Amino acid sequence: MTKTVFALLKKDLLLELRQQHSFYGILLYMASTIFVLKLSINNPEGEIWNGLFWIIQLFVCVNAVAKSFLQESRGRMLYFYSIADAREFIIAKLIYNIILMLVMSLLSLALFFVLLKNPLSNTLRFTGIVCLGGVSLSLVFTLLSAIAARAQQNAALMAILGFPLIIPQLLLLIRLSRSAFGEVFREGALLQLSLLIVGLDIMVVALSIILFPFLWKD
């Protein structure tokens, strides 16, 4: 199983390297959006900075992860069906999208620091929360991308299903990231929020492994 997952992951990474236009397109979208924010709000307050960052992360994730299944043709999916198990395939996709979203999240954070300054009181903690948030967003939208790909390749379906599901997770991330701006939390609250987000991630992974085989057979 590990060998097949690694082979599928390697395939996705090689395709990304060969089709760099999609990666640079998302990067250009992200950079231009942050630059427009720079022109509109030169030096935002910490709370506004935090909210804007997570909103951009949400839309970057939708653009980055949407293509993970929607770009796969029916013929290619039939080929994968003949050589790999459904669980191996979805695990490879989850890992690939986690890597992609971690890269995008860190690049987005770097652009925010360059263009919109750094209002954080604990940069290292916020970076860790950004990585946690990137993983969480990528997991949810990978599952939704798989569902949307089975529904007549309708990318709009992913957005319609995704936003109601992602809002609670996004609110938790925004709340958790406020600790990096110097907000005082009661003892144990940060750990509880972090564990809640991790628990939601584990639930999404479990649902993906359980439900994807049914989509795979369709």
Image: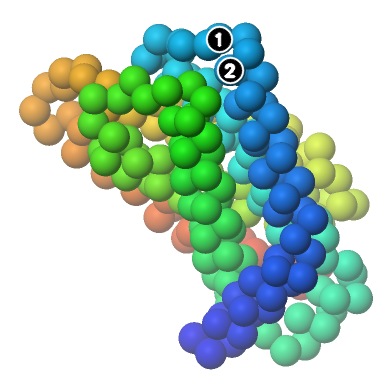
**In the picture provided, is 69 more to the left or to the right than 176?**
right
Quadrant in the picture for residue 133 = top left
Q: Please state the horizontal and vertical placement of residue 103, each as a whole percent of the image.
A: 52, 53
- Of residue 62 and residue 88, the one placed in the foreground of this image is 62
Q: Do the residues labelled 2 and 1 touch (CB within 8 Å)?
A: yes
**Residue displayed at 55% across by 82% down:** 6
Tell me the CA gap for discs 2 and 1.
5 Å
Residue type, numbered disc 1: Ile
Neighbourhood count class around disc 2 (C-alpha, 10 Å): few under 14, some 14–19, many 20 upward: some
Quadrant in the picture for residue 200 = top left
**In the picture provided, is 69 more to the left or to the right than 128?**
right
Q: Which residue lies furthest to the left in this view?
A: 187
Please tell me whether residue 56 is drawn above or below residue 212 in the rendered image.
Answer: above
Can you tell which mark lies on residue 38? 2
Image quadrant occupied by the C terminus: bottom right
Quadrant in the picture for residue 156 = top right
Q: Please state the horizontal and vertical placement of residue 35, each as a whole percent of the image.
A: 63, 24
Residue 213 makes an appearance in the image: no
Q: Is mark 2 on a helix, strand or loop?
A: helix
Can you tell which mark lies on residue 115? none
**In the picture provided, is 81 more to the left or to the right than 124?**
right
Q: Please state the horizontal and vertical placement of residue 158, each as a whole percent of the image.
A: 73, 42
Residue type, numbered disc 2: Lys
**Residue displayed at 16% across by 21% down:** 185
Q: Is mark 1 on a helix, strand or loop?
A: loop
**Residue displayed at 24% across by 25% down:** 121
Please tell me whether residue 123 is drawn above or below residue 44 in the rendered image.
Answer: below
Q: Name the residue under label 1.
A: 41
Residue 74 makes an appearance in the image: yes
- Of residue 44 and residue 208, the one placed in the foreground of this image is 44
